[in-house]
Amino acid sequence: MKSIQVMTLDLLNKLRILIFFCLLFSSPSLSIAGNFVTNNMLFSYQPSYPNGTPPYNYNYAPSVIFNGSVQQFWWCGGANPTDVIYYTSYDFNTMKWSDIIKVLWPAHTSQNPIPWDNMLTCDPSVVMGSFPYNGINYSYAMYYSGTDDMRGFTGVGVAFSNDGINWVKYPEPLIRKPNPGDGTIFYGYGEQAVISANGGSNLWLWILNEPSSTIPQVYNLYESQTGTDLQLQYQITGNGVWGWIDGYGECVGGEYVQDFGLCNGFITEADFAVGYPSGTTPVIYMITDHVNNTSQMDLYQIDWDLQSSGTWSYLGSITSKLTGNAFNSSGGFLKNIYGDVSPWLPIIEVYFGSGLNRNNDNLWWAQY
């Protein structure tokens, strides 16, 4: 099993240039690029953000795409008094970073006639395509979590853009279970991931659903034809995924795997991406927080056709031993503009929050 590598951002940029060179001149197995990464020594690095530091010291849940020669980053960060979405980019031609700017934030009545997300906006997942909305064709869609109640009741919204910076929100949540008014508190829907189905407006979305505080959360797969509609397909299997053992020693959300002593079947905050390691068969990759352990994220894969009933294959973990930090969470894959990791396979690159805790962390990255 390969190991997870953590490196500096400058080294990352140099490494990717070498990877592209190997992609051009190596065999389809990418053995040169794979060996180069596998055999590289470990580095750990907390980026200092060369053009400024966002207010409040938490940064996590990134969405990262490689668009031409530019790598674009959106992530959830701290602002007074709640979560907003920041943006920066790195241009491999000029070797320069753009300024870090706030690009999406909680709405108020003056900005949105239905301010359902006026308490927080977080968990961006960005894809490119062709998205007609209000007479304008947009090239970016961002799916994000929002709510008007800090206790929970989160929903999933979408915003559109033609530059990745200036966004127009769709006014209503695409999916949300509002406060029932009976004192019940639950998370709701969110922590979503999106990929393109056809390079246009047809999309696939994985959306977390916690319907109550007593029922384990699950991920469901949805299809969207327009970018603003959702059709439920099925629940994502938790087979093979490490789960949660409660205070009574019971396995919540799955079954014990006797051979390994693991609790099997519980997916928490995750990102999903598609890849084609064999060239033709789509594989889904998932990076998910390890339940009841905010110091670890786990990497899995499964064939596309087995997402509802198959078993996830474990690939590796990002842990405190690797980063030196107590908190490692909320990972997002490096993808192309359509949500595909194939250009870099067998290398898989993950960005995530890492630091002292969820309120004191920076964006880190690692390679598998």
Image (spheres, rainbow, N blue to C red):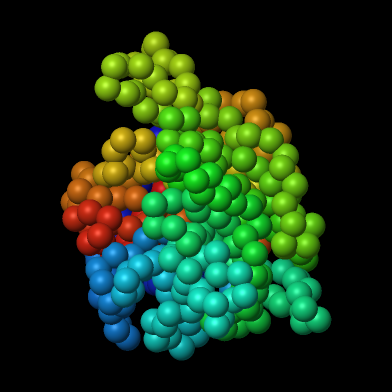
Query: Residue 49: x and y, percent?
Result: 30, 78
* Whether residue 127 is situated above or below residue 285 in the rendered picture: below
Residue at 63% over, 52% down: 175
Q: Residue at x 58, y 30 (%)?
A: 237
Count of numbered marks? 0
| Whether residue 238 is situated above or below residue 233 in the rendered picture | above
Q: Is residue 365 visible?
A: no
In front: 258, or 223? Answer: 223
Point 51% across, 74% down: residue:
107
**135 relative position to 321: left or right:** right
Q: Is residue 248 left or right of residue 348?
A: left
Query: For the view shown, which residue lies furthest in the front direction?
Result: 182
- Residue toward you, 108 or 56: 108
Q: Where is residue 173 drawn, in percent x and y?
A: 62, 60
Is residue 152 visible in the rendered image? The answer is yes
Residue occupying image coordinates x 78% and y 62%:
226
Q: Position of residue 148 (x, y in %)?
A: 48, 62
In the displayed structure image, the side of residue 219 where residue 128 appears, left or right: right
| Residue 339: percent from left, percent from top | 61, 58
